[in-house]
Image (cartoon, helix red, strand yellow):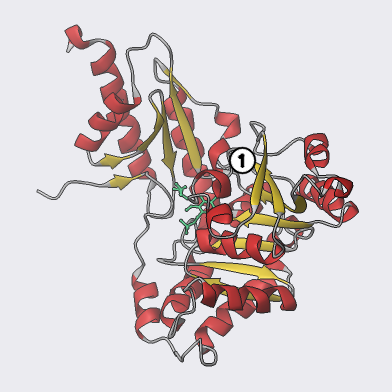
């Protein structure tokens, strides 16, 4: 019997749709290193227009997109970047900006809402007069939505304030916009307004948009030209990438409109979880497509016990720690999957908390 699978591990787990596969199979392609791939060019022009920037570049992953942007902005030895202590660039990218990029990280505490305190940002900027001893601050990085705070959205006004600080000190601003479309839909603000103050943005095609592979970075024409050279240096120059970009173009058409529904399903799941004995979810803080489900002290519940029980029912999740599980909704999770997950979890919670009654 084929087991029902409900994959809540991440929004990176989606499978290409039939329309994506058809587009991939019939994509018009050419060598994107020797010249340019026409389908890649279409995607890049589309993304630059949507994001309100001069130019765009397809890259194999969000990690490489962030690395390239940081390295282009911080192209002088001794550069330092100000970024959040729980941001993806600092936590999940193997320290690449330092080990490969030679850029020094200056972390600031991420607040619960994914922002960094504005006074702390400005206070972290190195005094150029201290350059005998200190690195030189060249870049500030934000992340919108902020994954480790549960997919929280940064407002356009907050981003503008950080942009003003950067400009005042002659710095650049990069946004890790892996889920910027989720922020745009949740806030009801266009993506180009959200990133107006940014000098560069890295946008994942392979998350909520549901494309199988890739990201796009956007910025000025001169920035993207430097980024293209660095992409090749890092081994990211690829040939007939129209095969991948064709799927991304379908994703933009098909899945962008579905993000609102992803967020609705997230709220439905969060509200259901919050009613369960021993489980706590900050429903208000679940602004987009992510849920952090916490186990209350003394509830006998642990992330591993629940993960194991859910897996037995085909529901896949990733524990954040011993008492927290993250669940991520995407366009291939149905409302019925949400109800199924709630029913299985209710059963697991009951079994774990009242073993003798079962
Ligand atoms: C906020 C954020 N930025 C960047 C990335 C990196 O993207 P990729 O997995 O394509 O390298 C991810 C997740 O994958 C992410 O969640
Ligand atoms: C873990 C992280 O790299 C990935 N972006 C995710 O959110 O699933």
Residue at the far front: name it. 132
Residue at the far left: name it. 1
Q: Is residue 315 above or below residue 183?
A: above
Q: Secondary structure at mark 1?
A: loop
Residue 8, percent from left and from top: 37, 44
Residue 344, percent from left and from top: 27, 30
At 56% from the left and 78% from the top, the residue drawn is 43
Q: Is residue 180 above or below residue 297?
A: below
Closer to the camera in the image, 49 or 29 = 29
Quarter assignment of residue 351 = top left
Answer with left or right where residue 185 lies relative to residue 296.
Answer: right
Q: Is residue 77 above or below residue 44?
A: above
Q: Is mark 1 within 8 Å of ligand 1?
A: no
Residue 33, percent from left and from top: 51, 87
Quarter assignment of residue 327 = top left
Closer to the camera in the image, 133 or 179 = 133
How many numbered dots are placed on residues in this image?
1
Q: Is residue 116 above or below residue 2?
A: above
Answer with left or right where residue 14 lies relative to residue 288.
Answer: left
Closer to the camera in the image, 87 or 123 = 123
At 38% from the left and 49% from the top, the residue drawn is 333
Residue 52, percent from left and from top: 73, 69
Task: Examine the rendering and report whether any part of residue 65 can be seen.
Answer: yes
At 52% from the left and 63% from the top, the residue drawn is 64
Dividing the image into 4 quarters, which one contains the C terminus? top left
Closer to the camera in the image, 64 or 205 = 64
Task: Examine the rendering and report whether any part of residue 178 can be seen.
Answer: no
Answer with left or right where residue 309 lies relative to residue 258.
Answer: left
Q: Residues within 10 Å of mark 1 (few under 14, many from 20)?
A: many
Answer with left or right where residue 232 lies relative to residue 315.
Answer: right
- Look at mark 1 in the image and give the residue it sits on: 152
């Amino acid at each position: 019997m084929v087991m029902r699978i409900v994959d809540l591990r991440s929004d990176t787990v989606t499978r290409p749709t039939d329309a994506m596969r058809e587009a991939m199979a019939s994509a018009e392609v050419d060598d994107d290193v020797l010249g340019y791939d026409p389908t890649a060019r279409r995607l890049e022009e589309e993304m630059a227009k949507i994001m309100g920037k001069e130019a765009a570049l397809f890259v194999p992953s969000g990690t490489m997109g962030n690395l390239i942007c940081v390295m282009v902005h911080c192209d002088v030895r001794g550069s330092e970047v100000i970024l959040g202590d729980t941001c993806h660039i600092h936590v999940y990218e193997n320290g690449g900006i330092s080990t490969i990029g030679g850029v020094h990280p200056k972390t600031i505490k991420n607040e619960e809402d994914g922002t960094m305190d504005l006074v702390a940002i400005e206070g972290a900027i190195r005094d150029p007069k201290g350059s005998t001893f200190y690195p030189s601050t060249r870049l500030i990085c934000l992340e919108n939505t902020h994954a480790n705070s549960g997919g929280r959205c940064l407002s356009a006004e907050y981003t503008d304030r950080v942009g003003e600080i950067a400009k005042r000190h002659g710095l650049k601003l990069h946004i890790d916009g892996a889920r910027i479309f989720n922020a745009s839909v949740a806030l009801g603000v266009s993506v180009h307004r959200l990133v107006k103050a940014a000098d560069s943005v890295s946008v994942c095609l392979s998350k909520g948009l549901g494309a199988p592979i890739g990201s796009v970075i956007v910025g000025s024409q001169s920035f993207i030209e430097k980024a293209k050279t660095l992409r090749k240096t890092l081994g990211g120059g690829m040939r007939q990438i129209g095969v991948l970009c064709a799927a991304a173009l379908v994703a933009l058409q098909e899945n962008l409109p579905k993000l609102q529904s992803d967020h609705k399903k997230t709220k439905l799941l969060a509200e259901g979880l919050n009613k369960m004995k021993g489980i706590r979810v900050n429903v208000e803080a679940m602004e987009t497509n992510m849920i952090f489900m916490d186990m209350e002290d003394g509830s006998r519940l642990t992330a591993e016990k629940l993960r194991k029980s859910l897996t037995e029912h085909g529901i896949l999740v990733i524990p954040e720690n011993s008492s927290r599980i993250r669940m991520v909704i995407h366009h291939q999770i149905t409302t019925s999957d949400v109800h199924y997950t709630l029913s299985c979890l209710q059963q697991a919670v009951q079994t774990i908390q009242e073993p003798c009654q079962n």
